[in-house]
Amino acid sequence: MALQSKMTVYAAIAGVLGLMGGIVYYASLDNESLEQAEIELVNIELRDVNSLKNQAKFDVTFLVTNPSEKTFTVSQIGYQLYGDGELLGSGQYSTADIALPGRAIFYSGASVPLKSTFVLSMSEENSGVYNSMINNEIANFMADGSLTTETSWSVIESEFKSELK
């Protein structure tokens, strides 16, 4: 191979690597805006009690707000739910299997409520908490977990903690 042919190959490789670096840099410009997303636990409502399976289903509502100028979507909210300081279990809101254009869009300044179904199963260890939940006797709820926000170029996962009294 001639010297000129090798130089052409090296220049092409350097060009491709430079282009890839530029794409990564451009995608990272969204990260600061995505990290500004705010999430708040706003409601927990009993939906159904199945006494045969000893399970209760609750609608857990989070209010997600976009204080930045960048439009984004939420693909996932994973959370641990606590009632009066006691762990009730884990829950998840997910639209990861839905294409980006089909999800709720968070424009600048928008606040959108997102609902998740939380299932609480009764066992010997948590029968007191289970009965308190279905009788609406728990005064203080807290959720902590992670919020995954996306643009067409970037994905950010941020931690949150929110309390509902």
Image (cartoon, rainbow, N blue to C red):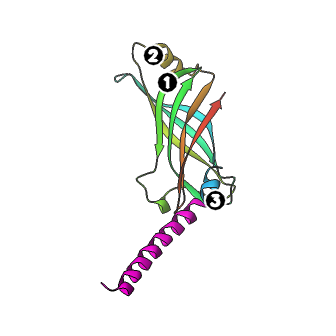
The image quarter containing residue 6 is bottom left
Q: Quadrant of the C terminus?
A: top right
Q: Are marks 1 and 2 in contact (CB under 8 Å)?
A: yes
Marks 1/2: CA distance? 8 Å
Q: What residue span does the magenta drawing correspond to?
A: 1-29
> Furthest residue to the left?
1
Horizontal placement of 89 versus 45: left or right? left
Percent across and percent down for residue 141 are 60, 27
- Density class for disc 3 (Cα within 10 Å; few <14, some 14-19, many ≥20) is some
Q: Return the residue at label 3.
A: 107
Question: Label 1 amino acid?
Answer: Leu
| Residue hosting label 1 | 88
Q: Position of residue 163 (x, y in %)?
A: 64, 31
The relative height of residue 110 versus residue 80 in the rendered view (above or below) is below
The answer to whether 52 is drawn above or below residue 57 in the figure is: above
On residue 31, the disc is: none
Q: Amino acid at mark 2?
A: Asn
10 Å crowding of disc 1: few (<14), some (14-19), many (20+)? many
Q: Earlier in the sequence, mark 1 or mark 2?
A: 1
Q: Disc 3, disc 2: CB below 8 Å?
A: no
Label 2 Cα crowd, 10 Å radius (few <14 / some 14-19 / many 20+): some
Q: Amino acid at mark 3?
A: Tyr
Residue 1 image position (x, y, % from top left): 30, 84
Residue name at image x 60 percent, y 38 percent: 160
Percent x, y of residue 69 = 68, 60
The residue carrying mark 2 is 126
